[in-house]
Image (cartoon, grey):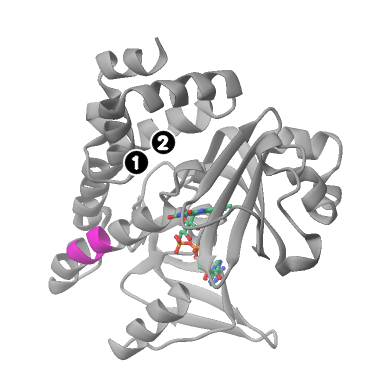
Amino acid sequence: MFDSVLLEAAARAGATVREGVAVEDLMMADGAVVGVVGRTGDGRRETCEARVVIGADGLNSVVARRLGLARSSAPRRIAFSAHVADVAGVEEMGELHVGKHGYVGLGPIGGGVTTVALVLPLAAVREAGRARAVRSGFFAELERFPGLRGRFDARRLVRRVLVTGPFARWTRASVSPGGGALLVGDAADFFDPFTGQGIYSALRGAELAAEALVTALDRTGPLTARALAPYRAARRAAFAGKWVLERLIGLGVGWPALTNRVVSRLARRTDLADLVFGATGNFVPARRVLAPRVLTQLVW
Ligand SMILES: Cc1cc2nc3c(=O)[nH]c(=O)nc-3n(C[C@H](O)[C@H](O)[C@H](O)COP(=O)(O)OP(=O)(O)OC[C@H]3O[C@@H](n4cnc5c(N)ncnc54)[C@H](O)[C@@H]3O)c2cc1C
């Protein structure tokens, strides 16, 4: 739904929309990106020249990989997500269930349907070669979480189980070192989905990219890395503290005992809860939670 709204808005604003074409490679000249090479659904190769290429192609971004900027780090996790109708006990609130095996997020999306995302450590899925088994035994996996037992009816699966990951992926730089390209959204940074930050970060990053590009494209000549540097700086200012916080939360979720401790602290200390949820909800600066005094109070 949201994707269609964005697509229609882009088309209304004058973009030429080409669906069913996958970008496979970048066109380069003197170290700078000068366009993309795509493949149509019927296998035809297409090229498209551009003064700037914006890599908004998600977690496994071809643009980031071709630029040699993609990196990954712990905690490496993988998500199995589905839409399920009539999940018992789900009303307007989302839920997060953290267990020894991973965590599950429930998010009501209207019409009695809930998005259910099961996130597991990649190693656990890989070791046992279990990815296919987890997918087919999705509901059995959910039953392993005490707070979810008996709440799902497997016949009410309304969208098949999709697999995403592994995360965490990030990039060494959000701008091509040779100029001519930049990265936004998951293509630039994807951390653990535990706090549900991806859409905000993708949209805020796109705003920052637009602001930087309006100025850069106004000048004639190639878009060097220097011309694109304001975007990189703006991203750092907007996201640096936030990514540290997200990283800490992502790592902490791997220890259910620690999660329980922090959650019980948050239940008792509404001031701390307001701070943490404000920072993850982007209306309180992340650095306020990262202050040693606050971090200490969250754990001890
Ligand atoms: C299990 C899970 C739960 C999540 N829950 C939340 C949540 O509750 N709240 C939240 O804010 N975020 C959540 N996220 C994160 C969120 O989904 C992403 O951060 C967000 O979708 C990023 O948007 P994007 O446009 O950068 O990438 P995407 O949404 O991945 O879009 C990338 C687009 O690029 C296209 N593409 C990819 N490769 C190519 C190619 N080679 N050529 C052409 N096109 C290509 C894809 O088809 C896609 O349309 C969750 C993620 C996961 C995995």
Circle 2: residue type? Glu
Of residues 72 and 93, the one drawn nearer to the viewer in this rendering: 93
Seen from the viewer's position, the closer of residues 25 and 168 is 168
Q: Position of residue 43 (x, y in %)?
A: 69, 84
Instruction: Tell me which numbered mark, 2 or 1, is placed earlier along the sequence.
Output: 2
Q: Position of residue 69 (x, y in %)?
A: 47, 47
Residues at badges 2 and 1 in contact (C-beta under 8 Å)? yes
256 relative to 59, above or below? above
Callout 2 crowding tier (Cα within 10 Å): few <14, some 14–19, many ≥20? many
Q: Is residue 296 left or right of residue 262?
A: left
- The disc at residue 246 is 2
Q: Position of residue 2 (x, y in %)?
A: 44, 73
Q: In this orientation, does residue 85 appear? A: yes
- Name which residue lies at 54% across and 60% down: 62
**Element on which disc 1 rests:** helix
| Mark 1, residue position | 280
Vertical relation: 296 (above or below) 155:
above
In this view, the residue farthest toward the top is: 300
Residue displayed at 53% across by 84% down: 19
| Circle 2 SS class | helix
Q: Residues within 10 Å of mark 1 (few under 14, many from 20)?
A: many
User: Considering depth in this image, is 7 or 65 the residue closer to the camera?
Assistant: 7
Count up the numbered dots: 2
The residue located at (49%, 67%) in the rendering is: 26
Let me know if residue 79 is in the magenta part: no
Most frequent secondary structure within the magenta stretch: helix
Residue 227 x %, y %: 20, 57
Q: Which residues are magenta?
A: 207-211
Q: Nearer the viewer, residue 180 or 123?
A: 123
Residue drawn at 39 percent across, 86 percent down: 8
* Identity, as a three-letter code, of the amino acid under mark 1: Thr
